[in-house]
Every structure is written in structure tokens, then in C-alpha cells.
């Protein structure tokens, strides 16, 4: 039995790749099959968006770990060249039906500041876990903080092959989870500030 366990352990160890894995430069959400809002809700939301513009300032990466995002079986082989830009592209992909994000500076416009606090990936036996933590702060045009929150997006899935696509998929799902929460936060704060 000990020999069988040793052979299985060696066989599994041979499947672990230590090749560097680089995340995609842009957020790539999974396709959406349908929109749950009806036409009247979308029309009302579009009117609100015109009255709730926000400047999305460049995302600040405040993680102490730098580019290291963890890896497969503790190998620390996942990296991102521009994780802040990836998060920024995620925010710009939001539906923005109730508010309007822009990266262009405009006087008299509220600001959304996003800090990337944590981003890491780990594997436990046959599971993969991706986590992203962001701090969001909405500021009035005069710089006064209207609202702030810290959000976590997580993906726990089966780790099929220790591959680049597993890492990218995990981080994309975790960011999608976080962006859904951020969308509600921004919508609420636009209504409160209107």
C-alpha cells in the first residue's frame, strides 16, 4: 500500500507545472446569456446614468506582494504585468445603466477611487481558489468621501490541469463576483447622491 501511495504521489507531482503563468492584460468576462432587466427598467436606468457621472481614477495597487499572485501547489508561478489595468478594464466593462464611468477628468464630477488590496491564487488538492480584495471610495466633486467599502471576489473551482487557462478563468470569475457587488454599491451611491 505504501508503494502504491508513493507511485501515485510521484505521478501527481509530475503533473504540476512550474512554468510561469501570465494573466491576460484585459478582463474577460464570461458571456451573458440574457439580461434580466425589462425595457422599462433599462430606460429608467439610462435617464439616471446621465445624472450620475463618475470619474474612475487609475486603480492603485497597494498589495505588498507586487506582481506575485501565488500559483499552483505553492509554486508562486502566476504573474500579471498590469494587474491595476486589468481591474480598471473590469470596471469599464460594467453595464453602467444607472451611472456613467469615465477616465476623462471633468470638473464638478464625483470620483471613484479603487485600491487593489489583495489578489492571490492557491490550490488545495483538486481545487483552485482565486481571491481579489478591493477598497472602493466614492468622493463628491469637492473631495469629501461620500461612501467607501471593501469588497472581496472569490472563485473556488475544480483545478483541471494547473494551466494558464485555469488561472485566468479563476481570476476572471473572482473579479466578476466582485464587480457584481461593486455595481450594486455604485448604483446605491448614485441614487443617494442624486
Image (cartoon, rainbow, N blue to C red):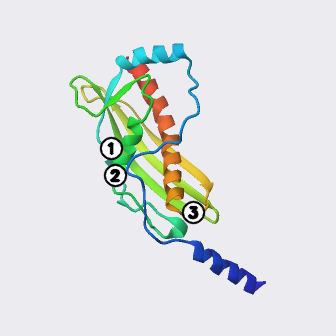
Labelled pair 1, 3 in contact (Cβ < 8 Å): no
Q: Are marks 1 and 2 in contact (CB under 8 Å)?
A: no
Q: Residues within 10 Å of mark 2 (few under 14, many from 20)?
A: few
Instruction: Return the x and y of residue 187 as percentages of the image width and height.
Output: 45, 25
Q: 101 above or below 9? A: above
Q: CA distance from mark 1 to mark 2?
A: 9 Å
Which residue has dot 1 on it? 59
User: How far is disc 3 from disc 2 in space, using C-alphas?
Assistant: 24 Å
70, 172: nearer the viewer: 172
Q: Quadrant of the N terminus?
A: bottom right
Q: Which residue is mark 3?
A: 123
The circle on residue 116 is none
Q: Residue at x 52, y 51 (%)?
A: 169
According to the picture, the residue beneath numbered tag 2 turns out to be 62
Q: Quadrant of the C terminus?
A: top left
Image x and y of residue 167, in percent: 50, 57
* Residue 107 placement (x, y as % from top left): 20, 24
* Left or right relative to 173: residue 110: left
Q: Earlier in the sequence, mark 3 or mark 2?
A: 2
From the viewer's perspective, is the residue at label 1 or at label 2 nearer? 1
Residue depicted at 39% across the width and 20% down the height: 49
Amino acid at each position: 500500500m505504501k508503494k502504491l501511495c508513493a507511485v501515485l504521489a510521484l505521478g501527481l507531482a509530475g503533473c504540476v507545472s512550474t512554468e510561469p503563468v501570465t494573466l491576460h492584460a484585459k478582463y474577460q468576462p464570461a458571456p451573458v446569456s440574457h439580461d434580466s432587466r425589462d425595457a422599462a427598467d433599462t430606460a429608467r436606468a439610462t435617464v439616471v446614468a446621465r445624472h450620475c457621472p463618475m470619474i474612475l481614477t487609475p486603480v492603485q495597487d497597494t498589495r505588498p506582494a507586487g506582481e506575485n499572485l501565488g500559483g499552483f501547489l505553492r509554486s508562486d508561478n502566476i504573474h500579471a504585468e498590469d494587474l491595476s489595468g486589468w481591474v480598471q478594464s473590469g470596471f469599464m466593462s460594467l453595464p453602467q445603466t444607472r451611472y456613467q464611468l469615465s477616465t476623462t477628468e471633468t470638473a464638478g464630477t464625483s470620483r471613484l477611487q479603487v485600491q487593489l488590496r489583495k489578489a492571490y491564487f492557491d490550490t488545495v488538492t483538486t481545487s483552485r481558489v482565486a481571491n481579489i480584495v478591493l477598497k472602493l471610495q466614492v468622493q463628491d466633486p469637492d473631495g469629501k468621501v461620500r461612501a467607501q467599502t471593501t469588497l472581496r471576489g472569490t472563485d473556488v473551482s475544480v483545478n483541471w490541469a494547473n494551466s494558464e487557462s485555469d488561472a485566468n478563468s479563476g481570476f476572471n470569475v473572482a473579479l466578476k463576483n466582485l464587480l457584481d457587488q461593486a455595481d450594486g454599491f455604485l448604483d446605491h451611491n448614485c441614487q443617494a447622491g442624486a
